[in-house]
Amino acid sequence: MLRWWPAVAVPAVFVLGWAVGRGTTPLDSWLLAIDGPDWLIWFIKPWVLAAVLVASCAVALWRGHWRLALVVALCPPVAVAAAQGLKRVFGRELDGGLAYPSGHVTALVAIAGMVILVAGMKRWVVMCAAAVVAVEMYAVGTTFHYFTDTVGALLLGTAAVAIAVQLAGRRS
């Protein structure tokens, strides 16, 4: 699955981006009207994401996995840079800022993927990471992004993680 996922996910980012266009969708409007609690967005705070990424790199280095540490260090910033570039392609705005795909959720997904990779793809780590990503997608999609922005970010982030896994030489 890891080999072909980027070939599916990246085109899906474009299809979803073109489908939602520059405005809102009924789902996005409904979720933004909920006005989710701000405290739920704790896991996408930059200092939290940076701390988790640094810890993941440190664990990989401590274990002597230099290639893995390099991949872990590079995957999230590359994924976020891709999200920032795609924001300019799609031009979707919310409250005066470019919205699609969400850079916050792209970073979270990429970092969660790196945690899973460093942890050896253990099932319980995957389940915890998936739960955190799901909660944050909801939180971001009900506060300062359209929910469909988070879906595009999930697709982009998981594509970046799949490529990172291959570059790190790991198998699922």
Image (cartoon, rainbow, N blue to C red):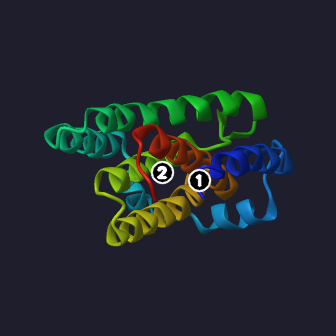
Q: Nearer the viewer, residue 74 or 25?
A: 74
Judged from the image, the secondary structure of the residue bearing numbered disc 2 is helix
- Residue 152, given in percent of the width and then of the height, sits at 66, 50
Judged from the image, the secondary structure of the residue bearing numbered disc 1 is helix
Residue depicted at x 78% and y 51%: 16
Amino acid beneath label 1: Leu
- Residue 159, given in percent of the width and then of the height, sits at 59, 46
Q: Is residue 78 above or below residue 93?
A: above
The residue at the far left in this view is: 62
Q: Which mark is residue 154?
A: 1
- Residue 92, given in percent of the width and then of the height, sits at 75, 39
Q: Nearer the viewer, residue 7 or 23?
A: 7
Amino acid beneath label 2: Val
Q: Is residue 27 above or below residue 43?
A: below
Q: Nearer the viewer, residue 160 or 136?
A: 160
Q: Visible in this render: residue 11? A: yes
Q: Which mark is residue 118?
A: none
Residue 46 lies left or right of residue 109; in this view the side is left
